[in-house]
Image: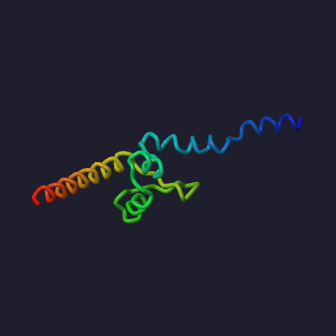
Amino acid sequence: MKKAAAKKQHTKRLSTKKKRAARVAPKLEEKLIMSTEARMEFGFSRDMMTKLLANGTLPYTSDPLDKRIKWVRREDVAEIAAKSNKQQRAGIGTKNASRNSR
């Protein structure tokens, strides 16, 4: 009988993936993504994402089970990406204008 009870107990334990999914589920309602996912999705370099997180430009929430994981709002990252794209386009336009004026 002890073996049967042990089997039931084993099946009730959640795997690491299920624990992570259960922990992430409430965060999906807030549209949070991991900083590494945001970096890949919006095309930021690793250094740029680190700077944005370190200087507070991009607010984040640390994962309670793994302090290396940082959760960011997708909307915040999209806003910063749009600003950086505008700045890049403006910078490219001025470079081309100065080349044409020569």
**Furthest-bottom residue in view?**
55
**Which residue is depicted at the point 54% across and 58% down?**
68
Q: Is residue 22 above or below residue 86?
A: above
Residue 50's spot in the image, x, y percent?
Answer: 43, 61
Q: How is the image coloured?
A: rainbow
Q: Is residue 102 above or below residue 71?
A: below
Q: Quadrant of residue 47?
A: bottom left
Residue 13 as seen in the image, left or right of residue 5 = left
Residue 7's spot in the image, x, y percent?
Answer: 81, 36
The residue nearer to you, when weighing 20 against 35, is 35
Residue 36 as seen in the image, left or right of residue 11 = left
**Which residue is depicted at the point 41% across and 58% down?**
49
The residue nearer to you, when weighing 45 against 93, is 93
The residue nearer to you, when weighing 68 against 28, is 68
Residue 20's spot in the image, x, y percent?
Answer: 59, 45
Number of on-image labels: 0
Residue 96's spot in the image, x, y percent?
Answer: 18, 55
Residue 96 as seen in the image, left or right of residue 49 = left
Position of the C terminus by quadrant: bottom left
The residue nearer to you, when weighing 60 against 36, is 36
**Which residue is depicted at the point 58% across and 54% down?**
65
